[in-house]
Amino acid sequence: MASRSLHPMPGLGPAAGTGAAAEPAPRAGGTGEAGRGAGPGRHPAPVWAGPGGEGPPETLAAPAPGYWQEAWRRLRKNPLAMAGLVVIALMVVAAVVGPILSPYGYEEQVLAEANQPPSAAHWFGTDHLGRDIFTRVLYGARISLAVGIMASLIGLTIGVTYGAIAGFYGGMVDNVMMRIIDVIYGLPFILYVVLLMVVLGPGLDNVFIALGAVYWTGMARIVRGEVLSLKQREFVLAARVMGVPPWRVVWRHLVPNAVGPILVTMTLLVPEAIFSEAFLSYLGLGVQAPIASWGVLAAEGNRALRAAPWALFFPAGFICLTMLAFNFLGDGLRDALDPRLR
Amino acid sequence: MQYAGQRLVVTVITLWAIATLTFFMMRAVPGGPFDAEKDLPPAVKANLEARYHLDWPVWRQYLDYLRRTAVWDLGPSFTYPNRTVNDIVADGFRVSAALGALAIGVALLAGIGVGVVAALYHGRWLDRTAMFAATLGISIPNFILSGLLIYVFAFHLRWLPAGLWGKPAQAVMPTLALAALPTAVIARLVRANMLEVLRQDFITVCHAKGLSPARVVFVHALRSAVLPVVTYLGPLAAGVLTGSFVVENIFAIPGLGKYFVQSVTNRDYSVIMGVTMFYSALLVVANVLVDVAYRLIDPRIRL
């Protein structure tokens, strides 16, 4: 299997789409053992198993740089990924402090100033109710980033647990668990998010839950593949021989060693979740007025396209910039953490 | 053959699981479908519920629902009492399928083309530009792209109509909006595969045999590089079909997506359930077909 589409597109999803959201990056061989080779086994056994006090005999060579130092060095040399990192950092700062600095409230309506183009007073113009779009975009950043991060954290928790169990036990358990994933993978994700939202009712918390409940299959596949190949390695055998209980082997030895691919998958999950939230908001199932995510703002902008096109342009720009930043960072991280895939 | 039988069993179980899941999810919605309407007289409400069998115990509703779904009777719409969900699905899907097929066709052609060119110019500016554009393509939600396209081509340049369905010109923008994301995904996929294939020994052999470079690339390399795209067709179809929900609404196209969005707004549960079942079944079956086709096309994978 190659990839899934999001959202809403995808993208988002995966389709979009996720679904609509579509999972952007094609990742070859997520499932098969053969596909991922030795996992991040290129770096020596985990740190805690490394040269402790007694350590290996002194050698003349300089100490080899650690996995993370090496990865960071590679990442720094990737201008697009670094640009992505900077943009994400700026977005987070803007989301946190921006609304405090803005002189307008995000739901402050001045009907006399409706549909004004960008000006010195209203940097991004005003919408059909005379609300300052700059302020609303900054508030929207809070909602959209929160959705992206929370949904990917929930997806992380479910996906890692599921994937680790499947990979660790292998055999029949693995077979059944992976068939279930195959089935879920082939379904129109976003429809189930919609269904969940209809059941749960609109609201920010429910958006987290609905997206998290659906976007964990990619993560589960990656983790399962990593665990499956890692568990063949000597340090795992050593741990088990020493009588470490299975759950501890998984959590202390297998999952930490799969952190690279997990991080990449998470980074790429964030834009997918933002994408899907925008889709839900478009259907009126996302966050409720007067709170507005970027998706809500873009949907409002779409409706007012003739009178106030800037109401679409600015939120659209922020959505695209953020998704681009996460996608570039994710691609860069993959190159940096997994040099074999270059 | 044993494989086919196994797949059939799994498919049937899957469809049953989907039907059960959607049924109980819709039961879990707080309040009945007619609670929203302003103070119906109790007698009217009782009549309505009787008509839709909502007065039956849940297990009986469930069995009835399973039986009807098995023979593909999706029931009446709650909002439009004189239409069945089957009508709505049949009506809307004709349009959605046409739009989806257009978008998938464009995405396959453009995506494979861009991917091959990028791979041939690996590392040079053409490759970089193409991959930058591809990342841009997966970063623009389709409803935003739709809005921007309408703004530029309908409002400003006045080249294309801003909506509706029927004339070829009306299909251009929705197709582009839907195809952008899959095009980008396919381009990245084909480029990566192509780079890998071009490094393999049999390509060297082709060159050594004196085949023209064009023949090596377009006949021998392309065939292996494009194969994995077949596995992406399932998710691709899912993405395009669900992606068209919003696009159909923006362009006022009378497809299934438009009905679905309406039914979400109206809380027309039987339509929401019916469309979900329809698309799920469609994609489950499509995925099985893709899988089988892939194994037939690629002799390296045995059934």
Image (cartoon, coloured by chain):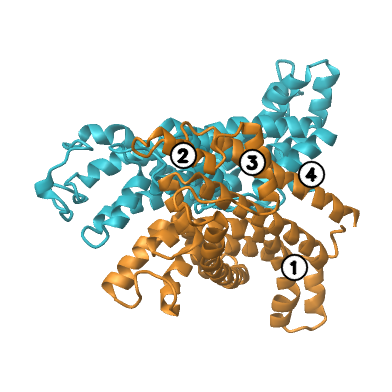
Give the cyan chain's letter: A
Which chain is disc 2 placed on? B
Question: Circle 1 sits in a helix, a strand or a loop, which is it?
Answer: helix
Residue B299 placement: quadrant: bottom right
Measured from the top left, where is residue A97 in percent x and y? 28, 32
Q: Numbered disc 1: what chain? A: B
Check if mark 2 and mark 1 are on a common chain.
yes
The dot on residue A217 is 3
Q: What's the CA distance linking mark 3 and mark 1?
A: 27 Å
Q: Is B147 drawn above or below residue A213 in the view shown?
A: below
Q: Which residue is denoted by mark 1 in the rendering?
A: B224
**Circle 1: is it few (<14), some (14-19), or many (20+) Cα within 10 Å?**
some
Q: Earlier in the sequence, mark 2 or mark 1?
A: 2
Q: Position of residue A262 (x, y in %)?
A: 61, 37
Mark 3 nearby-residue class (10 Å; few <14, some 14–19, many ≥20): many
- For the point 47% across and 46% down, the residue is B268
Could you tell me which secondary element the residue under label 3 belongs to?
Answer: helix
| Numbered circle sitting on residue A33 | 4
Q: Amino acid at mark 3?
A: Thr
Mark closest to the chain's N terminus, 3 or 4: 4
In the image, farthest residue toward the right: B2
Q: Which mark is residue A37?
A: none
Q: Colour of chain B?
A: orange
Mark sitting on residue B33: 2
Disc 2/disc 4 C-alpha distance (Å) = 48 Å
| Front residue of A9 and A57 | A9
Which residue shows up at 50% across the image and 46% down it? Answer: A272
Q: Chain of mark 4?
A: A
Q: CA distance from mark 2 to mark 1?
A: 52 Å
Query: CA separation, marks 2 and 3?
Result: 32 Å
